[in-house]
Image: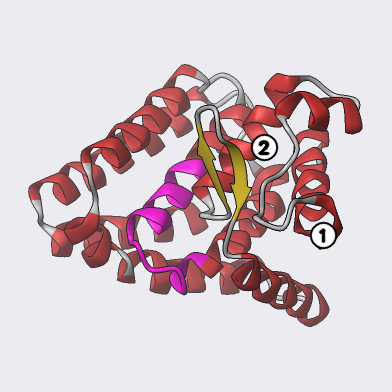
Amino acid sequence: MDKKNELFENIKNYLLDDANRDADGRIETETELAIRFNTSRYKVRQALGTLVQMGMLERAPRRGSVLKNVGSHNINNQLLMQFDLSGFDISEFTEARILIECAIIPLATRRIFPAMLSKLENELRLIEENADNPQEADRHDRDFHLLLLQASGNRVLQVFSDVLITYFEKTRESLPANDRQYFIDTATKQREILAHIKKGDAQAASELMRAHLLEKRL
C-alpha cells in the first residue's frame, strides 16, 4: 500500500472510532487532522474528499464535517476482512464490478443531478491531465467509479465502495508504466458512458460500462 492510501486508511479508521468524534458525528478540522497525522491540510482534504464520495462523510461550509452511515461502513469492514481471508483474485473482483457497476447505471441515470455530473466530468478531466502520472490518474479513475456509485442514491449498493477501493489498490502495481494513452483511452470511454447517462440511455451506458470493465481485465 502506498503512502497516500495508507494515510487514507489511517484517517478513515480513526474517524470510524466512536471515541474520535462528537455525539452528532462531527469530526476534527482539517488542521487538527493534519497535525494529528503529521501531514498537510491538502492531503487531509484529499482523504476527506474520498470519504465524501463514498457517502461516508458530509461536508458543509462553516458547519464542519459530519460522519454518517457508520453502520454501513462497519459492514464494509467485515466484508473486506472476509475478502482478505478468502483470498479472492482480481478476476473475481472484476466479475463483481461488472455485476454491480452495470446494475447501478439505470439508478444513476434516473437520479443523477447537475452537480454530480460536474464532479464526474471533473474526474475525467483530471485523468487526462495526469495521464503521465499513473498513480494519480488511477486515483481519479477510482473516484469516477465511486461517484457513479454515489449517484445511484442507493446506500446499500454504496457499501460496495470499499470493495472498489480495494480493487484499485490490488491492481495499482500492474498499471502500465509510461503509457499516457492508456489513461487517455480510459477517460474517452468513460466520457462516452457519461454522455449516454446524460441522455437518459441507461442500456447503452450499461453495455459500454460492461465492455470497458471487461477490457480492463485483459
The magenta region covers 142-158
Residues at marks 2 and 1 touching, judged by CB atoms closer than 8 Å: no
- Quadrant of residue 25 within the rendered picture: bottom right
Residue 182 percent across, percent down from the top left: 46, 33
Give the residue at mark 2: 47
In the rendered structure, does residue 181 fall within the stretch colored magenta? Answer: no
Which residue reaches farthest front? 23
Of the 4 image quadrants, the one containing the N terminus is top right
36 or 10: nearer the eye?
36
Can see residue 135?
no
Residue 58 percent across, percent down from the top left: 53, 46
- Asked if residue 171 is positioned above or below residue 62 in the image, the reply reads below
Q: Is disc 1 placed on a helix, strand or loop? A: loop
Q: Which residue shows up at 88% across the image and 25% down it?
A: 35
Give the residue at mark 1: 17
> Residue 49: which disc?
none
Q: Which residue shows up at 75% across the image and 80% down it?
A: 82
Q: Is disc 2 placed on a helix, strand or loop? A: helix
In the rendered structure, does residue 148 fall within the stretch colored magenta? Answer: yes
Can see residue 194?
yes
